[in-house]
Amino acid sequence: MLDCIIVGSGPAGISAALTLRANGKSFRLFGSSGLSEKISKAELIRNYPGLSNVTGQAFCQALQTQLQASEIAITEEKVSGVYALKGKFSVLTNEGGAYESKTVILACGVENIRPIDGEERFFGRGVSYCATCDGMLYKNKTIAVFCTTKRLEHEIAYLADLAKHVYLIPMYKDLSIARDNITVIRKMPTKLEGGMRITGLRFATPPLDGGSELLDIDGMFMLRESVSPAVLTGGLQTENGHVVVDRLQRTNLPGCFAAGDCTGRPYQYAKAIGEGNVAAHAVSEYLSENQ
Ligand SMILES: Cc1cc2nc3c(=O)[nH]c(=O)nc-3n(C[C@H](O)[C@H](O)[C@H](O)COP(=O)(O)OP(=O)(O)OC[C@H]3O[C@@H](n4cnc5c(N)ncnc54)[C@H](O)[C@@H]3O)c2cc1C
């Protein structure tokens, strides 16, 4: 069993991985080979000590080179659930992967787009964050798909193959998916409605010509770069959407640590990298105390 699983390949996750490698621990780092759009899209970084006026692209390249030199590979799978089970963690991914570890570091960042009203209430009752996990439940049904990144278009395609109709709400410009059963809506929904399960998606004004403000749907998929840590990890204590941690980056779940933007402001590289480092040292201490 792995010593640790790190969820997220941004500055916090990378920093944690480098420290765990230095401490001789076994681990798996989940994320993407592009590391984090919050690194690559930064125009110019002026506030990171030692790197004055570096572009986000150059910073990203330097981190990738450092990971390679340290022989740290990134597992390009999206973690869909982290389950604490008697002294170990079971981690599942959208791609069907299942992994086990003694500890977990949540370094999944924060999503800039706010949750839609009703999203938490209907989670598991019509709201899903994983196309491959739950797509089959919506075979021949009408669904809405809210997607924040082009990187997840393969998940839209998978859902469109199954569903009768897809109302697609992309939050990015260069959309490159088109199907007969996909209707693209360029408006932000305001609310999810229903009783025990979702039945409708409401907009401030009719999203389609001549239609109503309420679209009838059977389910809604939220395809985001970052899923809220509370959704990923049952029983995790959060406050205002951030994971509650102590000075050692420990969460309320023994063996589960968190670092970076997901623990709160300021949203900055230096804080994320510092917390990733502290979390990795705390993991090493936890492992020696719980051998
Ligand atoms: C345009 C822009 C410019 C910025 N400029 C600066 C700056 O100049 N100086 C500064 O200090 N800060 C800057 N920031 C803020 C900085 O980018 C963030 O504070 C920092 O990236 C946070 O690091 P993180 O590791 O916590 O999260 P992130 O960088 O958000 O990384 C999280 C990673 O985890 C991945 N992930 C999330 N959920 C999962 C999952 N379930 N499974 C697998 N992977 C997952 C995400 O895809 C992402 O790659 C900027 C941010 C933006 C958007």
Image (cartoon, rainbow, N blue to C red):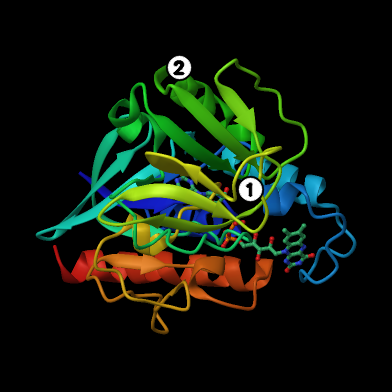
Q: Are marks 1 and 2 in contact (CB under 8 Å)?
A: no
Label 2 SS: helix
Residue in the foreground of this view, choosing between 217 and 102:
217
Q: Which residue is mark 1?
A: 36
255 w.r.t. 29: above or below: below
Residue under pointer 2: 161
Which amino acid is tagged 2?
Asp
Position of residue 155 measured from the top left corner of the image (x, y, whole percent): 49, 29
Which numbered marker is on residue 185? none
Where is residue 252 drawn, in percent x and y? Answer: 27, 76
Q: Give the alpha-carbon distance from disc 1 to disc 2, as whole Å.
A: 29 Å
Mark toward the start of the polypeptide (1 vs 2): 1
> Taking 44 as reference, is 67 above or below it?
above
Residue 142 is situated, as x and y percent measured from the top left of the image, at 43, 31
Query: Foreground: 88 or 37?
Result: 37
Is residue 223 visible in this depiction of the protein? no
Type of amino acid at the residue the image marks with label 1: Ser
Q: Looking at the image, is 256 positioned above or below residue 240? A: above
Quadrant assignment for the N terminus: top left
Q: Outermost residue toward the left? A: 86
- The picture quadrant for ligand 1 comes to bottom right
Viewer-nearest of discs 1 and 2: 2
Q: Residue at x 40, y 61 (%)?
A: 229
Relative to 96, 41 lies left or right: right
Binning the other alpha carbons within 10 Å of mark 2 as few (below 14), some (14 to 19) or many (20 upward) gives some
Q: What is the quadrant of the C terminus in the image?
A: bottom left
Q: At 36% across and 67% down in the image, what residue appears?
A: 257
153 displayed left or right of 171: left
What's the residue at 80%, 72% (across, down)? 47
Q: At numbered mark 1, what does the secondary structure look like: helix, strand or loop? A: loop
